[in-house]
Amino acid sequence: MRDRVLDWLKDNVPPPRLQHILGVEQMSGDLARHYHLDEEKARWAGLMHDLAKCFKPERLLQMAREEGVEIDPVCENTPHLLHADVSAIVAQHQFGMNDPAILEAIRNHTLGRPQMSDLSCVVFMADALEPSRGESAELEALRRTSWENLYQSVAQTSDYSLRHLLNTRRVIHPRTILTRNWAMQKSRDGVIISVNST
């Protein structure tokens, strides 16, 4: 099925976006293996996380409404934020992906969600930190943290996204802040999932 997904992506996203998607697939799988999570599920979520990235706003809103996705005022006015939910819909309808953990990780890769699964955390981080995102000192530091502390990395990645949104004067969805606060509290509570010693 991977070849079928790749063929579809080549027809629906530009080459730089496909490069990003493949980077997320790779990093999600690597981080999942590192944190003793299901590597195959992480790779599927990474591969399918941006299926709807290039859909027009009207299509995102229509598909979300048809599937009963909750559309709050922020998403109503910034439909691009719905691409994660709609990507999960495409994964399900176009490719028959019905694994709840994979679909959840796809849905949560942009805004995150308090109490999201460790698999969702991995895809959330990979989306922000995969190699094609750049090579700044800040990104390199975030990548190092992603291998050391899952929840601290989610909190710091959320901070990074929030700074970018503030600097570019874009709308901030409250869920990004809730995700950041949840991950920060988990990190402060000393919740660290085990990692490989190698």
Image (tube, helix red, strand yellow):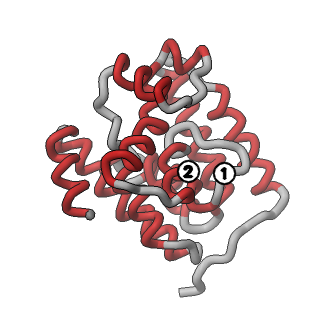
- Closest to the observer, 180 or 98: 98
- Closest to the observer, 15 or 38: 38
Disc 1 target residue? 116
Q: Is residue 73 left or right of residue 85?
A: right
Could you tell me which quadrant the N terminus lies in? bottom left
Disc 2 target residue? 104
**Is residue 154 visible to the viewer in this orientation of the structure?**
yes
* Residue 62 image point, x, y percent: 41, 21
* Residue 68 image point, x, y percent: 55, 29
Q: Nearer the viewer, mark 2 or mark 1?
A: 2
* Residue 66 image point, x, y percent: 46, 27
Residue at x 56%, y 46% (from the top left corner): 157
> What amino acid is at disc 2?
Glu
76 is higher (above) or lower (below) than 33: above
**Is residue 137 visible to the viewer in this orientation of the structure?**
no
Distance in Å between CA atoms under marks 2 and 1: 8 Å
> What amino acid is at disc 1?
Met
Count of marks, rendered view: 2
* Residue 120 image point, x, y percent: 57, 54
Q: Helix, strand or loop at disc 2?
A: helix
62 is higher (above) or lower (below) than 142: above
Residue at x 75%, y 45% (from the top left corner): 182
